Image (cartoon, rainbow, N blue to C red):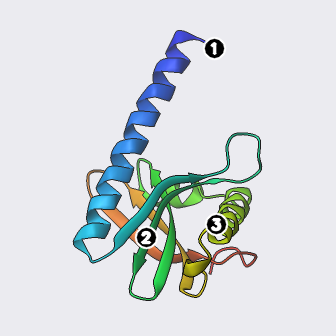
Amino acid sequence: MTEARQARGRSAERRGRLAEALCTALLFLTGWRVLDRRVGGGRGTGIGEIDIVAKRGRTLAFIEVKARADDGTALEAVTESQRQRLSRAAESYLARRPELARLDIRFDVMTLAGWWPRRIADGWRPGLGRP
C-alpha cells in the first residue's frame, strides 16, 4: 500500500469518526439514547458493523453513518450488499440483547455533507431494498 493511499485511509477514518460523533450528539439532542457504537462482526465474517444503535421510546434504530460531499452520494454509498450485512449484524445484536427484540426496529441512515448531520428515518427495510 502506498503512503498516499494510507494517508487517504487515515483521513477517511478521521472524517468517519467525526461524522459519528456529530450524529451521536444530534441523536442525544433529539431525545435518543445511544446504546452502542461500532458493533458487529469483524472483517471477513460477512456481518457488517453497525455505526450507532440508539433507542427512543419503543423504537430501536440501527444507524448507518455516511460522510460524503453531498447527501445523494452518501445515500448511494449504502449499497444493497451493505444493507444485507447490516441486517445480519442487527440480527446478531438482537440475539445478544433479546430484551430489545420486542421494540419497533428500524434502519436509519445519517449523512454528513458539511458540518451538520441529516437523519433519514427508516432508510430501508431488510429484504425490501429502499422504501
Residue lying furthest left in this view? 29
The residue lying at 38 percent from left, 52 percent from top is 20
Residue 54 is marked as 2
Disc assigned to residue 96 = 3
Q: Is residue 109 above or below residue 19?
A: below
In the image, what residue type sits under mark 3? Arg
Amino acid type at mark 1: Met
Marks 1 and 2 sit apart, C-alpha to C-alpha, by 36 Å
Is label 3 in a helix, a strand or a loop? helix
Q: In front: 78, or 76?
A: 78
Direction from residue 80 to residue 67 in the image, left or right? left
Of residues 100 and 2, the one nearer the viewer is 100
Residue hosting label 1: 1
At 59% from the left and 88% from the top, the residue drawn is 102
Query: Does 34 sit left or right of 89 as displayed?
Result: left
Front in this rendered view, residue 119 or 95: 95
| Residue occupying the point 22% across, 70% down | 29
